[in-house]
Amino acid sequence: MLTWLITGASSGLGLAMTQKLLARGDRIAACVRRADALSELQAQYGGQLYLCRFDMIDTAAMREEIDRAFSTLGRIDRVVSNAGYGLFGAAEEVSDAQIERQIATNLTGSIQLVRTVLPWLRAQGSGRIVQVSSEGGQVAYPNFSLYHASKWGIEGFLESLAQEVKPFAIDVVIAEPGPTQTGFGGGLDHAQPLAIYDATPAGDVRRGIANGDFAITGDADRTVEAIIAVADRQHPPLRVPLGSIAYDHLVATLGARLREIEGQRELAYSADRT
């Protein structure tokens, strides 16, 4: 039996993961904002399910609840940073308050979660951190600039962190799902549109979202099963694309980026000291 800590455990991929892991006999510290969010699962699984209650933007409450979880449960083998949401709107359209909340939840909150669990994982001699990111952690679309900023940011943070904590037998996995049927779209925080963007790529994406024109091929259950399978590997990869759209977009985008960089070799070398 493994013990997992999962943020955002009351909906989407976090809920599906919690349900599957409980069913296979693992113990879960489920992090939610509402005390009654998982009442049915608590009634079904009893002491196998431990609840942590905090909002990702409240660092003090997060630390208190997670420290209590480690102290109570004795050991946590897997930490899944899953909580987050999307802010939708062109960069000029989103408000200051929307920007602050997006970064505080997806980026700063995820960073502080990792910083909170690290002393405990080091003390127990091993552990695994699983970040649920997105193909949007390496690929960008109009109207998601702040969401991308949060996901690109957390991926950079974790790529550095993975090198720092490897000597302590702590692994890092970054899961990058493509469009998946999880209710993510229904939870988008929408900016107030500006008419000036109607005839731009931002306007095209807005209409496409409103009309349901974008393919959503990812299956939530299969995505969660893949994340769990990777998290269970003895030597997991750092990044894991999930879904055909994510894989194809990442290969195409990273390939184009590499070709652009390679085409600038002479210019790059010219900046060296002679």
Image (tube, rainbow, N blue to C red):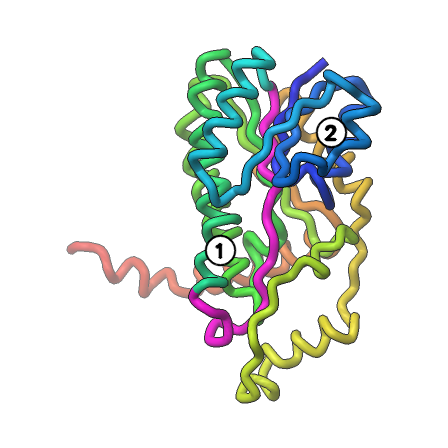
The N terminus: image quadrant: top right
Position of residue 92 in the picture relative to residue 252 (left or right):
left
User: Which residue is rendered at x = 25% and y = 62% of the image?
Assistant: 270
- Relative image position of residue 58 (x, y in whole percent): 47, 41
Can residue 73 be seen in the rendering of this structure?
yes
Instruction: Specify start and end residues of the magenta stretch as a single range.
Output: 77-96
Residue 85: say if magenta. yes
Residue 229 numbered tag: 2
Residue 81: say if magenta. yes
Location of mark 1 (residue)? 101
- Relative image position of residue 230 (x, y in whole percent): 69, 30
Kindly report the secondary structure that dominates the magenta region of the rendered protein: loop
The C terminus: image quadrant: bottom left
How far apart marks 1 and 2 lie (CA) works out to 32 Å
Three-letter code for the amino acid on which mark 2 is drawn: Ala
Asked which quadrant contains residue 273, the reply is bottom left
